Amino acid sequence: MKLFVSNYASQHKFARFDVQRRVRISRGKDRLERFDTSVIELAPSRRLLEHYRRGDMDENEYALKYWEEVDPVWRLAVGRLRDGDCLLCFCPVGSPCHRLLVAARLRKEGHQVIEI
């Protein structure tokens, strides 16, 4: 399956790619409704995100805690994805982010993942 990952602010670049659906993987409200569907199971809990943003944990601990939350629902969540989906969150390009953790795991499982 070919997938994309990006943030909401980069959607102007989608015309250059074959993005079929914009898939929200964040819990924050997108008042502009810049997504077609949600796979909220791939979003970190608000509590985990707050601890990470406050500096209570480093990137490695964040990743471990993230996978503790997501592992039980991973298969279900991935099963809802389609070829051409773009997974979206609010994190700026270049910053540590759960979408990059998801992209790395999807690649390990044999999927093609392109960051936009």
Image (tube, rainbow, N blue to C red):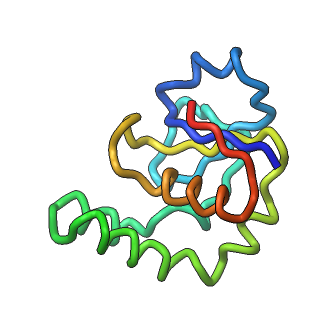
**Closer to us: 38 or 63:** 63
Q: Is residue 17 left or right of residue 9?
A: right
As displayed, is residue 3 above or below residue 108? Answer: above
Quadrant where the image shows the C terminus = top right
The image shows residue 10 at horizontal and vertical percentages of 51, 25
**Closer to us: 59 or 86:** 59
As displayed, is residue 58 above or below residue 113? Answer: below
Which residue is pictured at 80% across the width and 38% down the height? 84
The image shows residue 88 at horizontal and vertical percentages of 57, 42
Which residue is pictured at 50% across the width and 44% down the height? 89
Within the image, what quadrant is residue 2 found in?
top right
- Number of numbered discs: 0
As displayed, is residue 47 above or below residue 15? Answer: below
Which residue is pictured at 40% across the width and 52% down the height? 97
**Closer to us: 76 or 67:** 67
Q: Is residue 90 left or right of residue 54?
A: right
Which residue is pictured at 51% across the width and 39% down the height? 30
The image shows residue 99 at horizontal and vertical percentages of 51, 52
The image shows residue 61 at horizontal and vertical percentages of 30, 74
Within the image, what quadrant is residue 21 found in?
top right
